[in-house]
Amino acid sequence: MVLDFLPNVSDVRVQPFTIKYPLEGAERKYTPDVQANHTLADGRVVTHVYEVKFRDDLKLEWKTFRPRFKAMVAYCRSRQWRAV
């Protein structure tokens, strides 16, 4: 919701894509929460991919979330995006 009010943010997409990644001999799928383009002062556009979780949930389910987040970071880096 905050992204909707930032003047430098455009093209907000909810659950924008699905990443496939290997885990324990199987292919898994993970869909990030939000993708948004941020226009910088110099006119460049930077894409951020967001995953929103409560801190307590992160602590309780870190073993489940960690491989997903690693896959998201790798996916974003390969496209010169930022994982947030």
Image: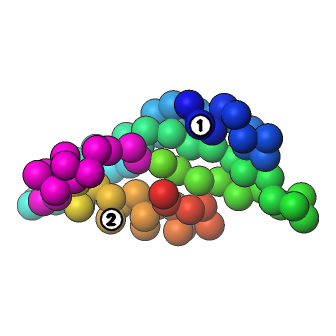
Give residue 10's position: percent from left, percent from top.
Answer: 74, 38
Left or right, 56 with respect to 1, comes to left
**Who's the residue at 11% across and 52% down the image?**
60
Give the answer, above or below, for where 79 lies relative to 48: below
Mark 2 lies on a secondary structure that is: helix
What's the mark number on residue 2?
Answer: 1
Relative to residue 37, is residue 41 depicted above or below?
below
> Which callout, 1 or 2, points at the residue further toward the start of the chain?
1
Quadrant of the rendering where the N terminus is positioned:
top right
Residue depth check, mark 1 versus mark 2: number of the one nearer the observer: 1
Instruction: Classify residue 74 by image quadrant.
Output: bottom left
Highlighted magenta segment, given as a residue range: 51-64
Instruction: Please state the horizontal and vertical placement of residue 64, each as a whole percent of the image.
Output: 15, 53
Question: Callout 1, which amino acid?
Answer: Val
Q: Residue at x 52, y 50 (%)?
A: 49
- Mark 2: amino acid: Lys
Say which residue label 2 marks: 70
Q: Percent from the top left, x then y, of residue 20? A: 33, 50
User: Callout 1: few (<14), some (14-19), or many (20+) C-alpha neighbours within 10 Å?
Assistant: few
Q: Of all residues shown, which one is farthest toward the right?
A: 42
Give the left or right position of residue 3, taking residue 18 as reference: right
Question: In the drawing, does residue 19 fall left or right of residue 68?
Answer: right
